[in-house]
Image (cartoon, grey):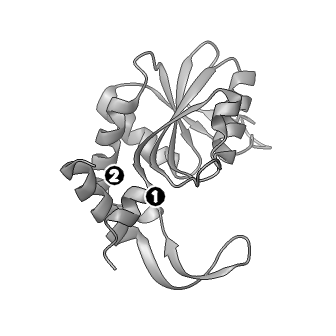
Amino acid sequence: MTDDRAALAAEIDSLCRLNGQFTLRSGLVVGEYFDKYRFEAEPQLLRRVAEAMVPLLPEDTQALGGLELGGIPIATMISSLTGLPARFIRKEAKTYGTRRLAEGGDLDGLRVTLIEDIVTTGGAVRNAAVALRGLGAEVDTVVCAIDRSEPCANRLHEVGVATRSVLTKQDLDAVRVG
């Protein structure tokens, strides 16, 4: 890991890794929790993460697809840095208003690179890729800030989606401060 990546990992880890008593979605109670929204809420850190993601974008990207909720601020920042248009991808289409799955413009015929904060199992990315393909988008890559997937847990390759990440869980664990 380069010094820049190690410094970024250390800063994210120290800000986001919390100790206490936390109940996970599964109901399991744990003594440590990684609050990913903390790095997204800090403008300078968010910018550094987005800057590290820019070189990972496929050259033929025509639009960024920020996944609800955590991918949206990152996609917005990357859009600002690159000039690429952003689309905001919901987990499911609204039942009111425009009733759209993707907000911000059409996707038909565009090569869309999905933007996510953290990939753990890839389930949300998989669902988004399949749905966006149904809307006519070409989707084959997700760029994420952190790949926290365990070996063989991220099965996005099975639906033709490659994962590119700035950091991994191993990177965060390597710089763990406490």
Q: Residue at x 64, y 32 (%)?
A: 157
Residue that carries the numbered disc 2 in the rendered image:
46
Looking at the rendered image, the quarter that the C terminus falls into is: bottom left
Circle 1: is it few (<14), some (14-19), or many (20+) Cα within 10 Å?
A: some
- The x, y position of residue 110, in whole percent, is 57, 16
- On the question of residue 40 being in view, the answer is no
**In the image as oriented, which residue stretches furthest toward the bottom?**
21
- The x, y position of residue 107, in whole percent, is 61, 21
Q: Between residue 128 and residue 8, name the one nearer to us.
A: 8
Q: Is residue 165 above or below residue 105?
A: below
Q: Is residue 126 above or below residue 119?
A: above
Three-letter code, disc 1? Lys
Three-letter code, disc 2? Leu
Q: Is residue 163 left or right of residue 50?
A: right
Q: Is residue 92 above or below residue 45?
A: above
**In the image as oriented, which residue stretches furthest toward the top?**
109
Q: Residue at x 71, y 34 (%)?
A: 100
Q: Residue at x 43, y 58 (%)?
A: 170
Mark 2 or 1: in front is 1
- On the question of residue 77 being in view, the answer is yes
**Element type at mark 2:** helix
Residue that carries the numbered disc 1 in the rendered image:
169
- The x, y position of residue 119, in whole percent, is 56, 49
Q: Between residue 65 and residue 8, name the one nearer to us.
A: 8
Q: Between residue 33 and residue 86, name the one nearer to us.
A: 33
**In the image as oriented, which residue stretches furthest toward the front?**
151
Circle 2: is it few (<14), some (14-19), or many (20+) Cα within 10 Å?
A: many
Q: Is residue 87 left or right of residue 75?
A: right
**Element type at mark 1:** helix
Q: Is residue 174 above or below residue 117?
A: below
Q: CA distance from mark 2 to mark 1?
A: 18 Å
